[in-house]
Image (cartoon, rainbow, N blue to C red):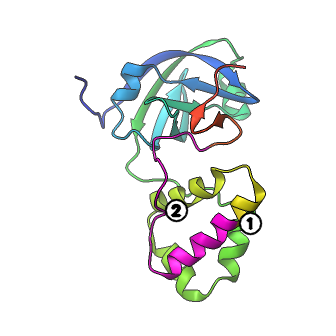
Amino acid sequence: MSQKSTTPIRFEAGLETVVTTTIVRMPGEASKLLPSRGQVAVNGFLNGHAFQSVIEPDGRRGHWIKVDDELQRAAGLSVGDAVDITVEPAQEWPEPEVPADFADALASAPQRIRLIWDDITPMARWEWVRWINATANPSTRQTRVEASLSKMDDGKRRPCCFDLSSCTDTTVSRSGKLHDTA
């Protein structure tokens, strides 16, 4: 059985497109070395070019890495190219990009809710954002924004009742599983 690692993990994989997003799927053996089945904040190198990211679960006990246009250009890569990747779990989580609807709701929330938001860890903030973003249905999304504020008002520091190892990016997944290559 593989041991979870906090040391660099090196692997080769192909750059692919899922729907409209360019990704690298981590090979199973590399994914098993990560410290979590859920999201993992990492520092890494893709063909020698440094990057920071939060690796996402694929809903199939593996992980994937989004490769944005800037990193693709810097590394001179195209879909189908093989890439050499080294990742190392980061000591600190980056701040999540808070979606506008949730940011607006937080900004107008009572101070006690904003204080909880400011006091929780970046990892916990990522979980709230993931939970809200895990639906494409606008009505469900609005309900989750409201429920997030209500739960924080009740002292909750993390959302509950969602599978942290599922893929919650609705642009590349369905039912918690990363789509196959488009």
In this rendering, is residue 73 above or below 159? above
Magenta segment range? Answer: 143-168
Name the element at disc 1.
helix
- Residue at x-position 46% and y-position 65%: 158
Name the element at disc 2.
helix
Question: Residue 134 appears at what percent x and percent y?
Answer: 63, 50
Query: Which disc number belongs to residue 125?
Result: 2
Q: Which residue is mark 1?
A: 101
In this rendering, is residue 62 above or below 168? above
- Residue at x-position 64% and y-position 21%: 180
Could you tell whether 130 is left or right of 43 in the image?
A: right
Q: The C terminus appears in which quarter of the rendering?
A: top right
Residue 60 highlighted magenta (yes or no): no
Q: Please, what is the three-letter code of the amino acid marked with disc 2?
A: Arg
Question: Residue 99 appears at what percent x and percent y?
Answer: 70, 60
Could you tell whether 136 is left or right of 27 in the image?
A: right
Pick the front one: 7 or 66 = 66
